[in-house]
Every structure is written in structure tokens, then in C-alpha cells.
Image (cartoon, rainbow, N blue to C red):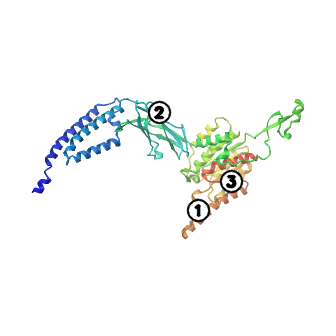
Amino acid sequence: MPAIWQRTAWLPSIAKLLVSKKQLVALQHSCFSYLRLLQCDNMPILSALYLQNRLLIACMVLIALLALSFGLEWLFLPAKILNGLLVLVLLIDIGLLFSLEQGVTADRHMESKLSNGEANLIRITARNCYRFKVGIEVLDEAPEQFQARNLHLRQHNVPPKSTVEFRYYLRPTKRGEYQFGAINVYVTSPIGLVARRYKFAQGTTVSVYPSLIQMRKYEMMLFANRLTEAGLKRIRRIGQNMEFEQIREYVSGDDYRSLNWKATARRNQLMVNQFQEERSQHMYNVIDKGRAMKMPFAGLTLLDYAINTSLVMANIALLKGDKAGLVTFNQRIGTILPAERKQTQMKKILEALYNQKTSYKEPDYDLLFTTLLKKIKQRSLLILYTNFETQLSLERQLPGLQKLAKQHLLIVVIFKNTELNQLLQSRPRNLEEVYIKTIAEKFMLEKELIAKRLMQNGIYAILTEPTQLTIDTINKYLELKARHLI
């Protein structure tokens, strides 16, 4: 009995504590009732409040003091005082955050059209309208296609009446429309017990087009004469440009063979003929949309790589003074855009490429050959983006390709299966891996034989990796221009 009595001797003190705790609970209820009375016209204050780690840590310390006060009654009074101070500081913190109806503004800035397969810059600017420093955390609701759940952007101690910019990148892998959600901005005062949430720019829709970033990149390099930095070769021009431009006065260093003797006699001074690069050649990007172009690589399909390269090639051809057109096909002919050099041609090509999709059917090459020979009368450069997997599939289409090559300058683009590189570089450890590596080498060799077979029949071939497609195609185009084949 004495032992049991000793164990229960502290029960009266617990009863006193329970009574005191009831008073604390009543005080807290009164505080929250006061908060419920603080309502904005449009948004309840409580729905915009979010607890911060500082408040949770303070509550944990307070709970620990209350727990210790079971055995040490003298701690209970300091715990009650700290509880009152915490409630007071909390109310001050809330008052600071809600002192302005619109304490922070935020906007999302990006291109009106995002580029497929590229890292697109998204900028969010937030302005602190308070009269004190605040901490700003931005949670942007990116389109569901990205599954980006970690876009937490933070900036501490943002000065009053100042603007801060947050940046992140998104890489889409499919063309189409993407829906952005709201910009959630969480603001904390220097006290930092709670945060106030603001929501901006809800329901923004943006379209993902073929890579405009890649197109502008090569366009700027072309103007700055820096294409070699992107891996493009320097092509030595063969012969002279034969398209006449004008007659001008001779200057030191001009070729004597270009002297115009009739003009020299009339003007009584040396005059030379000036020639320019041959222009107004026709160039068509012909894109296969069959099931072979559905093969994925780094998140994009081969069709997406072909579309991005076609956009770059069309733009470079127009800048070089040529005319650019577009043809797409699968089991039937899709888009036929005649080669032109109008200012609106790039817009037409861009809109046409935006809507292209692959199918799971075999493309009808016979229909393609018939259509091209019928629709395109002038000798043109045709860049055919396709993917022959076996020599047998090439042999079936070779007669039609030869007919095209007789009337036009034909380039056939086929893709290396880069997924096999890892197998080729690995060291087999057993008989099964030896067989697998042998089959992989056979596939790679067959691609090279396909390219050689095309060249033997007077058809230019580009065997390339998807990531090198644009560079290799531009190199071939500039090479043919330098050799005056187009």
C-alpha cells in the first residue's frame, strides 16, 4: 500500500493542471474565434494561412515544457506565459501579412510558343508591395504532361517595394496544347511563424511547336558566320557563282577573267561582271509519318526529330535565297506545301508541321513517288526523312527512288539505332550476350549497307544519329550548294 500511495501521490497536482489546461484551451479557442472574425471580402484569412516550421518548433517546445510540468510544477507558470507570448506574436505575424489586401504580385513570362524537345525558359517575377522584408516561395503548377512536382522556388529577405525573378526550364516531348495552373506564392514576414498564400495566372494555355529555339540558333549562327561552332563543316566552293548580278567598276584584286570589255569600252574605264550565289532553287522536306518513325529516342520520336530539322532547313533555305516546300505522307499523302519564297512561307510551314502525327501503318511509297513526279515539275532538292530497317525494305522502294533521283536531286535520311551502342561497347560475359552483341552488330552493319546501296544508285544518303540530324543535313545541303548541284 505505501508503494502504491507513493505512485499516486501526484494525482492532485494533475487535477490542478487539468483545470489550468482547460483555461488554456479556452484561451486558444477565443484566439481562433477572433481569427474567424477577420474575414476579407473575397478570401477567408484562415484558408490563406499556412503554418511554418518555426511555429511548429515553438509548439513542440511548449508541449515539452507542459509535459515536464507534470513532475516539476514550477515549470507550468513559465509555460503559460510562453503560450500567451506565442499567441500574441502569432497575431502580430498574421496582422503584418494581412496589412495589405495585395501584398505581393506575380506574373509568369515565357514564349508564346514553346519549342518541342528543347529546354524552354519559364520566368516568374514577384513584387514585394509590403513595407518590410519578406520571404517568398513560389510553387508553379506546371502542365500535367511534365509531372513536375518539385518546382519550389525560394528567395529570402526580399526588400520592400522590389521585384525578384525566379527561373526554371521545361522540356516538352510532344507537340500540342499544354495547360498551366496557378502560380502559388507563399509570403512570410520576418517573424516567420505563418505564411500567406496568393494565387495568380490561373489556367494559362500555351502551344508546343516544332523547335523554334533550334531554328533561331542556326539562323543567328548563319548571320554571324559561326556555323562551324555548331559542328558544321567549312565547304570549299567549286568554280565560280554563275548567276549574274550587276556590272561595276574594277577594284584592285578583282579577277581579270570577269572583265566586261564592252562596258569597259563604253565607259573608258575597267568594268567587271559581278556574280552572286545561285538562288531560287527549290527545296522540299519530305517526311515519312509511318510506323518506323514512331521509334522513340530521348523522349522524342524520330518524326519529331525530322520535323525540327525540317523547320531549320526550310528557314536556312529561305535565308540562302532558295524556295522551301513541304510534303508529308504515310498510307496516303498528307500535306503538300509548294516551294515558295514569300514572307509568309515560314509561318505556313510551321503551322503545317505543328499538326503532323505518326501512324502505325506502312507508308505508301508508290503513291509518294507518283505524287512527287506529278506535282513537282521543276528540278528540286528533295530531303526524304525515313527509316529503312532492312535491305529488303529498301529494295522494295529502290525503283521508285531511282525514278525520283533522275528528275530531282534526292537525299534519303536514315537513322542509326543509338540504343545499340551500349550493347556494342559492352564486353560479353556469357554465350547469350555474345549472341546479342552479334545481332546488334548485324543491325548496325545493315544500316551502313543501306546507305552504300543508295549511293551506288545515284541517291545521296545521310546515316545519322537523331541528335546529329540537323547538323548532318545542313552540312549536306551546303555541300551540294557549293558543288552547284542545285
Nearest the eye: 213 or 318: 213
> Can you identify the residue that label 3 sits on?
461
Residue 486 visible in the snapshot: no
Q: Which residue is mark 1?
A: 425
Instruction: Kindly report which numbered mark, 2 or 1, lies closer to the viewer in this rendering.
Output: 2
Q: Position of residue 125 (x, y in %)?
A: 48, 35
Label pair 3/1, CB-CB below 8 angstroms: no
Write down the residue under mark 2: 163
- Frontmost of labels 2 and 3 is 2
State the SS at label 1.
helix
Q: Is residue 283 left or right of residue 354?
A: right
Residue 82's spot in the image, x, y percent?
A: 26, 39
Q: Is residue 108 visible?
A: yes
Q: Amino acid at mark 1?
A: Gln
Left or right: residue 320 compared with residue 84: right
Image position, residue 137 (x, y; %): 42, 39
Q: Residue at x 71, y 46 (%)?
A: 478
Q: Against 115, is 297 above or below? A: below
Mark 3 or 1: the one toward you: 1
Q: Mark 2 falls on what kind of element?
A: strand
Q: Amino acid at mark 2?
A: Thr
Contact, CB < 8 Å: mark 2 with mark 3? no
Q: Say which residue appears at 27% left-offset and 43% top-offset.
A: 62
